[in-house]
Image (cartoon, grey):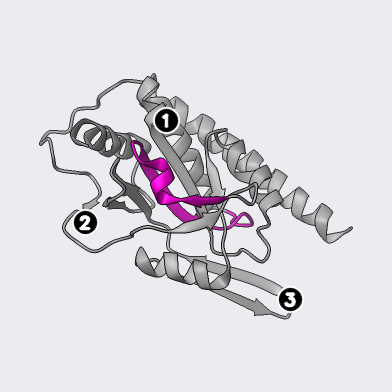
């Protein structure tokens, strides 16, 4: 079997898993609502980093090899995650959760942009990102850069990753958090991997209401 065929089969299997996970999320979450009622408006479910130095401007290449900057998405709340397309669990479940957040928000979901930044740009070509990322939601965008660009953007977001190659067996470890960026391009919230779609949607709508 060719390497290309192996990659395609791996992606197809991952997408099948993500489809099951997304269907499960939809059953658990129920019908979409516009507001889920934080008990204390202004207090986020995730970690509030509004007063801390997280993130900042960056420019990477998208799935069509076009330069995309964070500033391109001003006016939307950005859900940013780091990962790689061969990821067996964290990445597909995170992207499935982002899709569920958009569903929960109803029409406000159009004001949310999910960005998936690969930490494995050597294997994650533009074509592979194009086949993988939008399969969770057509609006989702995959981004990649050089090793130097990848290091710079992960460092800015206090994210970590490590790629190991032992006798041809490549393993990737990476930060599983989601970085929530407000409509003005400032990182406001860092959420853990296990935060629910409903809680994340709560935080997004809070940012949409306050700017």
In this view, the mark in front (2 or 3)? 2
**From this viewpoint, is residue 17 visible?**
yes
Name the secondary structure under disc 2.
loop
Residue 80 magenta-drawn?
A: yes
Name the secondary structure under disc 1.
helix
Give the residue pinned by disc 1: 102
Q: How many marks?
A: 3
Q: Residue pushed farthest right?
A: 1
Query: What segment is highlighted magenta in the picture?
Result: 67-88
Give the residue pinned by disc 3: 168
Q: Is residue 61 above or below residue 196?
A: below
Q: Name the spot of residue 211 as percent of width and height, x first.
A: 22, 37
Judge by depth and name the residue closer to the eye, 51 or 203: 51
Which residue: 43% across, 66% down?
Answer: 154
Judge by depth and name the residue closer to the eye, 20 or 106: 106
Name the secondary structure under disc 3.
loop
Give the residue pinned by disc 2: 49
Q: Residues within 10 Å of mark 3 (few under 14, many from 20)?
A: few
Q: Name the spot of residue 164 as percent of width and height, x first.
A: 60, 77
Q: Name the spot of residue 80 as percent of width and height, x first.
A: 42, 50
């Amino acid at each position: 079997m060719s390497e290309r065929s192996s990659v395609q089969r791996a992606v197809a299997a991952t997408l099948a898993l993500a489809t099951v996970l997304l269907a499960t999320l939809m059953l658990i979450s129920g019908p979409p609502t516009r507001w889920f009622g934080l008990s204390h408006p202004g207090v986020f479910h995730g970690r509030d980093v509004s007063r801390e130095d997280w993130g900042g401007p960056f420019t990477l290449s998208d799935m069509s090899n076009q330069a995309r900057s964070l500033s391109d998405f001003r006016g939307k709340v950005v859900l940013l995650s780091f990962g790689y397309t061969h990821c067996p669990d964290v990445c597909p479940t995170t992207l499935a959760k982002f899709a569920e957040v958009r569903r929960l928000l109803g029409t406000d979901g159009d004001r949310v942009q999910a960005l998936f930044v690969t930490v494995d740009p050597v294997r994650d070509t533009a074509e592979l990102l194009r086949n993988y990322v939008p399969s969770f939601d057509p609006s989702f965008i995959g981004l990649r850069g050089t090793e130097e660009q990848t290091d710079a953007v992960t460092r800015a977001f206090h994210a970590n990753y490590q790629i190991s190659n032992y006798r041809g067996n490549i393993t990737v470890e990476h930060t599983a958090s989601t970085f929530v960026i407000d409509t003005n391009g400032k990182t406001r919230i860092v959420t853990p991997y296990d935060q629910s779609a409903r809680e994340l949607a709560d935080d997004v709508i809070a940012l949409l209401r306050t700017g």
